[in-house]
Amino acid sequence: MSLKRRLREAFGGEKMETLTPGKTAPPISLKTLTGGTATLADALKKGPVVAAFFKVSCPTCQFSAPFLERIHETYGGEKFTLWGISQDDAEDTREFCKEFDVDFPILLETPGYALSNKYGLTHVPSLFLISPDGKIQETSIGFSKDELERIAAAAAQATGAKPSPLFKPSEHVPAVKPG
């Protein structure tokens, strides 16, 4: 049996595609970096959720982390949740968080990447803004300045906060950076 056929059978005969806006987000129930468990169903009771999948060795993930932290610092709390979903082990993920000053909650993907596969990940970082009704509102693959600004605007709206600029005028931030 060819590798292509084995892969097709392993993934249900379907081509993996990243989930797009309007689709229902698959359930999330993962261990947190601090030892608890987080579920999408519980988080959505408070408001929208951003699920940001990443790998610690990914340069675009490293580049994106401070901007995600800004969104979390500005809007995270009772009405908006931002999660990093690490595809690495707890030890490497802790080092990543320390090195890139990440304080937003981190969930740990299971071996075999079952959740990443359900979301159809092809690259990291991959971000999904999930509305309280469980539908994907925004999908962002790699780094996109415009898409991050839309996610920040949605977070501001959900929290009732005045939108705050995500990028500082003194920063030289590219419009896009592939993952």
Image (cartoon, rainbow, N blue to C red):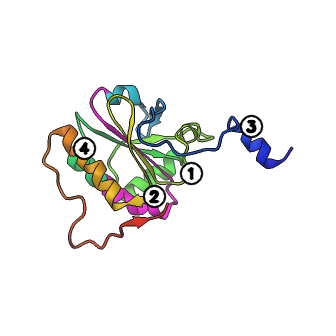
The x, y position of residue 90, in whole percent, is 50, 45
Query: How far is the residue under mark 2 from the one under mark 4?
Result: 20 Å
Q: Which residues make up the magenta segment? A: 45-68
Label 2 vs 1, first from the N-terminus: 1
Q: Which mark is residue 155?
A: 4
Q: Which mark is residue 110?
A: none
Amino acid carrying label 3: it is Glu
Q: Can you tell which quarter of the image residue 95 is in?
A: bottom left
Label 2 vs 4, first from the N-terminus: 2
Q: Residue shown at 46%/32% (left/top)?
A: 28
Left or right, 115 with reference to 128: right
Q: Secondary structure at mark 2?
A: loop
Left or right, 90 with reference to 45: right
Indicate whether residue 49 is drawn in magenta.
yes
Residue tagged 3: 9
Label 3 vs 2, first from the N-terminus: 3
Query: How far is the residue under mark 2 from the one under mark 1?
Result: 10 Å
Amino acid carrying label 1: it is Thr
Residue tagged 1: 122
Left or right, 154 with reference to 178: left
